[in-house]
Image (spheres, rainbow, N blue to C red):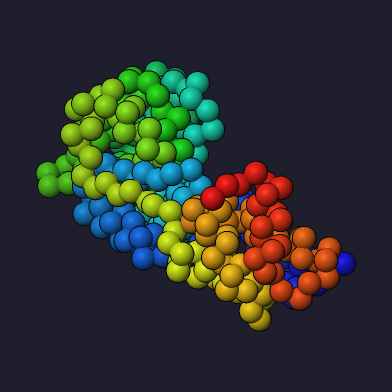
Amino acid sequence: MSYENFYGLKEQAFSNAPDSRFYFESSQHSEAMIRMLHSVDTMKGLTVMVGDIGAGKTLLARKALEKFEQDPHQYEAALLVMVHSDISATWIIKRIAQQLGVENVGETSAQIISQLYERLMKINEEGRKAVVLIDEANMLQKREIFEELRGLLNLEVPGRKLISIVLLGLSELDKYLALDPALQQRVAVKFFIKSLTRETTEQYIKHRLAVAGCERELFTNDAYQTIFEYTKGIPRLINTACDNAMLEGFLMKSESINAEIIEQVVKDLGLKK
């Protein structure tokens, strides 16, 4: 028997693997989504979403992509996730071109920009909006990359841009954006995603449990308080603490997860108040 079976769950509730089904729409995540959608719908150009490690940026990006993909008659959307910083400017615009449907993408920057312009014009003529979300954008650490992105944002028709770019990353993204002041000045919408409050930490945990099929109160009130004190409301740490607490509770055959169980697992994880 697994702890999922023991606690009546259909699946793991606290995996850190991105899954938009578990997206928790706190007031600030809702505001971030509204700002992002507004920026895209009005084709303002560049949107920047900055947040601390584990604050939920990746799920926000995937949820936004899901919304765009649900309306293909209005949007042509793509999501790129940067996994390392050793990439070239040509590589990233080539990936953008491929994701937006350019066929037989060229090898040089000039060729790719020309092909992208034709593709973006076609999308615009169809009455749709092109949007590219770039997650972990703090991995973009070269000035030439930002110069290429600025070049894409210069592609426009009277009254609107031809492409919307949304950058999501850690706070250090600001430092790298500053490598190209002209691009930094083009930021039309910016939002900082903070950690969860004590109240929203509890709501977050209950939400994930409900999505996983839990139909009862599993964590005690003092457990929620202890989780918040040790995780500081960071979703990724909340997931790790709760997952380990449920395993510990299962091994102890405890019907609920209390503060004592949380104290034990956060100690093992090395988390501090």
Q: Is residue 32 left or right of residue 57?
A: left
Residue drawn where x is 70% and y is 54% of the image: 265
Residue drawn where x is 35% and y is 60% of the image: 28
**Above or below, comparing residue 235 to residue 259 in the picture:** above
Q: Position of residue 46 (x, y in %)?
A: 27, 41
Check the image and name the residue furthest to the bottom. Answer: 216
Within the image, what quadrant is residue 270 found in? top right
Which quarter of the image is occupied by the N terminus?
bottom right
Q: How many marks?
A: 0
Check the image and name the residue furthest to the right. Answer: 1
Q: Is residue 259 left or right of residue 228?
A: right
**Above or below, comparing residue 158 to residue 207 in the picture:** above
Residue drawn where x is 43% and y is 62% of the image: 197
**Above or below, comparing residue 210 to residue 133 in the picture:** below
Would you say residue 125 is visible in this rendering?
Answer: no
Residue drawn where x is 54% and y is 50% of the image: 273
Q: Is residue 13 left or right of residue 25?
A: right
Q: Position of residue 40 (x, y in %)?
A: 28, 52
Q: Position of residue 233 (x, y in %)?
A: 49, 56
Within the image, what quadrant is residue 119 found in? top left
Check the image and name the residue furthest to the left. Answer: 158
Would you say residue 210 is visible in this rendering?
Answer: yes
Q: Nearer the viewer, residue 242 or 125?
A: 242
Q: Nearer the viewer, residue 181 or 80?
A: 181
